[in-house]
Image (spheres, rainbow, N blue to C red):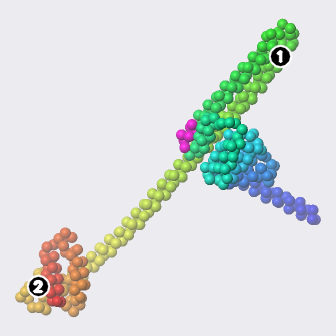
Amino acid sequence: MLKLIFIVSVFFASSAYAADFAVLKRQADANDAQAQYALALAYQQGEQVSASPSQAVFWFEKAAEQGNIKAMQQLVAAYQTGNGTAPDSQKVQFWLTRLALKGAPQASFQLGSYYENLKQASIPTSVLAELWYHIASTSDPRAEKKYAQLLEEKFNQQRARQVASINQLEQAVTEPVATSGADKTDDQLETSGYVSRSNLLIVLVILLGMALLGFMRMKRQQTQGYQHAMKQRAAEQAGELLTKSKTIKQQKQQLKRLFGQLQLLQKSHKELQQQLAQQSAPSSPPQPNEPHSQKMAVACAILGYTPTTLPDNKTIKIRYKQLCKIYHPDMKGSDEEMKRLNHAVKYLLAQRR
């Protein structure tokens, strides 16, 4: 019974590990840098999958190209020791420089120590140009184009050297045959020609394979550069749209507030007109020969008061300013109405002194 329980638990645990690994693989294929780094560690340490240093280097490089600092550090160690890939001093310089530019701890010191202990006396300028164009190609299309040109030139030079080596090999194979052909039998000549053709075919296959790998790598780097530029452009456009949307929203809110204030002003103006219409305002200002009580009533009515509800002078002046906005000729009023208002205010203020 215990054995059965153990077998079942092991089965379910392995199923869970397999499911987790499948999810991690899908996330890494979807270009998730954290998932790519975790998948590389799984291949490096043999967790949930058979250990594969070459696959670990592949996924470390994927994550490093997206700026993962830990993945860059792993690549430096891999290209220095040759674990999972061939040792490559140029790539060590590239990833150490990327780390130093990102401000990784100890990266600058490590880069200086690497240059100090470098066996070659000096670094060719073409190597440095390729290094910095490669670093800048992630954000600058011009650098990406220059980097592609340098890779193409490098490939062409390598191919020219390989063709020259093939020619030298052919000469080395054919010359002994030409000089000692008289001493060899027909069978020996046929065998020698077959061997030389076989060696030539093997060399050609190797060269074609190297050329194809170089071309595929260059195309992959170009595609990744284009994808990065497109993502960056899409992010910039999204940011611009978000900023414009916020501005439009603020303008709408401001217009709404102004419209509300305008409605309140119109309502107050309408109420004031109704109040004045309900009061019996005389058609002419108070005359000097009219009785005092009648003059007072007329002046109060023009300002919207009654003799018994007449406020203090400060309130009367405030009401006067409000009515000026209605009766002034510049505010769709008339000169007659403005004259009546001025006479009424002067009369009331003179009576309150």
Nearer to me, 187 or 75: 75
Q: Residue at x 75, y 16 (%)?
A: 171
Nearer to me, 175 or 271: 175
Residue 32 visible at all: no
Residue 102 visible at all: yes
Question: Quadrant of the image for the C terminus?
Answer: bottom left
Q: Secondary structure at mark 1?
A: helix
Nearer to me, 286 or 138: 138
Quadrant position of residue 19 = bottom right
Which residue was labeled with disc 1? Answer: 192
Q: Position of residue 167 (x, y in %)?
A: 72, 20
Quadrant position of residue 4 = bottom right
Q: Residues within 10 Å of mark 2 (few under 14, many from 20)?
A: many
Q: Residue furthest top?
A: 182
- Vertical order, 156 against 328 (above or below): above
Q: Which is nearer the N-term, disc 1 or disc 2?
A: 1
The magenta stretch spans residue 141: yes
Type of amino acid at the residue the image marks with label 2: Pro
- Vertical order, 59 against 341 (above or below): above
Q: Is residue 198 left or right of residue 72?
A: right
Badge nearest the viewer, 1 or 2: 1
- Vertical order, 107 against 267 (above or below): above
Which residue was labeled with disc 2? Answer: 286
Q: Position of residue 50 (x, y in %)?
A: 81, 49
Residue 100 tag number: none
| Prevailing secondary structure class for the magenta stretch in the rendered image | helix
Q: Residues within 10 Å of mark 1 (few under 14, many from 20)?
A: some
Stretch in magenta: 140-146
Q: Residue furthest left?
A: 289
Type of amino acid at the residue the image marks with label 1: Ser
